[in-house]
């Protein structure tokens, strides 16, 4: 009968697991903080010439739309295109911001066995 084997993994593995759990908790805490930051952020997108501006929160909730008075003179069809372009710009910027912040949060994270 062998002694001191426990469940088949030694203290080294146990230490790795403990470190992994600590890092996971840090990431979870960081993710919560990041979510709060994103909610407070304002990311602006705009159409060409800046005639229409769309502002989203960092987690892509619409905040406001600003339309320059001379944009109205361009007609409904062009105005629709300008609004769509500004929305896409804001969406792309917010997506990039979220991706970058998540990469910062998880950089250096090495979980054993994953």
Image: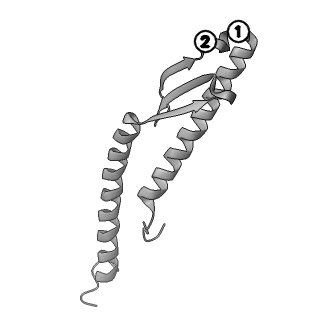
Q: Position of residue 87 (x, y in %)?
A: 61, 27
Are the two marked residues, 2 and 1, in contact with CB atoms closer than 8 angstroms? Answer: yes
Q: Give residue 73's mark.
A: 1
**Residue 6, relative to residue 44: is it above or below?**
below
Point 37% across, 35% down: residue: 40
- Residue 93 location in percent, x, y? 57, 40
* Residue 69 marker: 2
Instruction: Using the image as rendered, state which of residue 97 and residue 22 is in the foreground.
Output: 97
Residue 47 in view? no
The 10 Å Cα crowd at callout 1, few under 14, some 14 to 19, many 20 or more, is few
| Front-most of residues 33 and 114 | 33
Quadrant in the picture for residue 11: bottom left
Secondary structure under tag 2 reads helix
Q: Residues within 10 Å of mark 2 (few under 14, many from 20)?
A: few
Which residue shows up at 68% across the image and 22% down it? 82
The residue positioned farthest toward the left in the image shown: 4
Residue 15 is left or right of residue 65, and the answer is left
Q: Position of residue 5 (x, y in %)?
A: 29, 85
Q: Position of residue 99 (x, y in %)?
A: 52, 49
Instruction: Residue at 45% x, 58% y: name it.
Output: 104
Is 112 left, or right, of 96 in this rendering? left
Secondary structure category for the residue under label 1 = loop
Residue 104 shows in the view:
yes
């Amino acid at each position: 009968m062998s002694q001191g084997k426990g469940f088949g993994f030694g203290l080294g593995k146990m230490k790795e697991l403990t470190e992994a759990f600590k890092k996971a908790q840090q990431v979870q805490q960081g993710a919560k903080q990041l979510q709060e930051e994103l909610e407070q952020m304002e990311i602006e997108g705009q159409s060409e010439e800046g005639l229409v501006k769309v502002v989203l929160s960092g987690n892509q909730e619409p905040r406001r739309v600003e339309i320059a008075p001379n944009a109205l003179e361009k007609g409904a069809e062009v105005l629709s295109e300008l609004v769509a372009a500004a929305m896409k710009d804001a969406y792309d910027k917010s997506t990039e911001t979220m991706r970058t912040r998540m990469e910062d949060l998880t950089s250096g994270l090495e979980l054993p066995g994953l």
